[in-house]
Amino acid sequence: MPQSSRLQKRQTPALPSRLARLHRRFPRKSKLALYLAVMGPGLIAALAGNDAGGIFTYSQSGADYGYRLLWVLFVITFILALVQEMAARMGAVTQKGLGELIREHYGVGWALFALGVMFMANTATVVAEFAGIAAAGEIFSLSKYLTVPLSALIMWLLVTRGPFRLVERIFLGICLVQLTYVLAAFRAVDQLPAHLGWAHIMRATVTPQFSTNPKFILDTIAVIGTTVTPYMQFFLQSNIVDKGIRIEEYRYQKADVYLGVIVGNTITFFIIVCTAATLHLQGLHIESAKEAALALSGPLGHIGTTLFASGLVAASLLAAAVLPLSTAYTYCEAFGWEIGLKRSVKEAPMFYGLFTATMIFGAAVVLLPRVPLVTVALLSQDVNGILLPVVLVFMLKLINEPRIMGQYVNKRSQNFFAWSTVVILTVLTLILVIKSFLPNQ
């Protein structure tokens, strides 16, 4: 089939039969049924951000700085909601993914540049996911040569063989396992003296603290980069298009996006609190997931180890599937190849081929001898934070173009906060580079 025909087919998707049936079956006031029909992309995208690299980053932030970076998380939660809403709105209005929009409106050259940025961020992060699976297995003395290939095979079979709705429901079920970090945090804080309890934590959350120390700056960038990741935006927008959500249903999808942000960053908050309330107070710096889990077993007992490992496995499995999907969506959109989980492997060979290749590469790197798993995971988040402004610039240029978005362009307030994020991240990166070359300045 010619490329133009494939593009035309994707631009005019039919209203999903499930959503159409709900429109006919339920009265206008039955909003819950319609919300449940569109629920998924926002929650999955936000919670996939709490991946292995994210958990390592948040755990190490809590262990190294206590509650000093909670205020960054508080601020970035609003930015995440803003950026995710932009991606979802573009998908619902245009029925096109971000990669396709960049190619159509800025040409192949800029599309290849954006794809290169996304590829670097995704490749680093997908390796981190399998590093997380390997690290979680090591907590229970399981070899990575067993856990990594087995996990990759399970997620590959789920995505390539499972029906779309089943895949989405399993992804949502995996998300719920991350609630184990909430339980661990409450158990940890309950054992603290009263003056170090929740009132102290809440004050730290809204009290900005900063340092020009290069490591602090890099860790701040990492927290931002793992909370608002480049791949999230590509995946969310493409998944909304794949699901066939139109602007008429967008108010329900927006609720899904905001719920995902709230749930995802609430879990993030408790991950930092958990390690700050335990490891930081003990003066411990963690170098591996096993160290973190075993350190938590002191104040929390064996349940601390189990909760940490369970959350790490769930987060890694979810992102190990979402990241390769993000890569496959973006490249297939940009080049006009057939895409979507609703299509079979025969109907979309390039889509599933890219998904498979990305997953195999990530697993293979982790299986190499003497790979520093935590270092790989943490570096992936630094890469995400440094490359995020590039993706945001493309999004902001596209979403403010009336020819593309019509009446659904950004408001001034949305542009102000989004561009401020770009500027702040760019400045932080420049400071980091300067401090790295001039450490005594």
Image (spheres, helix red, strand yellow):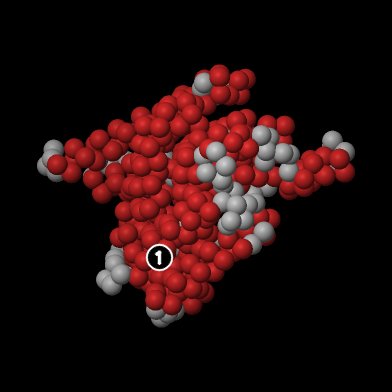
Residue at 58% across / 57% down in the picture?
Answer: 345
Looking at the picture, how far across and down is residue 325, in whole percent? 51, 52
- From the viewer's perspective, is residue 304 above or below residue 384? below
Quadrant in which the C terminus is drawn = top left
Residue situated in front as seen by the camera: 105 or 302 = 105
- Residue 414 seen in render: no
Q: Is residue 246 left or right of residue 355?
A: right
Looking at the picture, how far across and down is residue 76, in whole percent? 46, 40
Residue at 50% across / 35% down in the picture?
Answer: 100
- Tell me which amino acid carries mark 1: Ala
Residue at 14% across / 42% down in the picture?
Answer: 437
Direction bottom: furthest residue: 141
Residue at 63% across / 52% down in the picture?
Answer: 343
- From the viewer's perspective, is residue 280 above or below residue 258? below
Residue situated in front as seen by the camera: 427 or 326 = 326
Q: Is residue 407 left or right of residue 111?
A: right
The image quadrant that residue 161 belongs to is bottom right
The image quadrant that residue 252 belongs to is top right
- Give the residue pinned by disc 1: 363
Direction front: furthest residue: 1
- From the viewer's perspective, is residue 408 above or below residue 177? above
- Residue 427 seen in render: yes
Helix, strand or loop for disc 1 = helix
Looking at the picture, how far across and down is residue 137, in whole percent? 43, 74
Quadrant in which the N terminus is drawn = top right
Residue situated in front as seen by the camera: 401 or 433 = 401
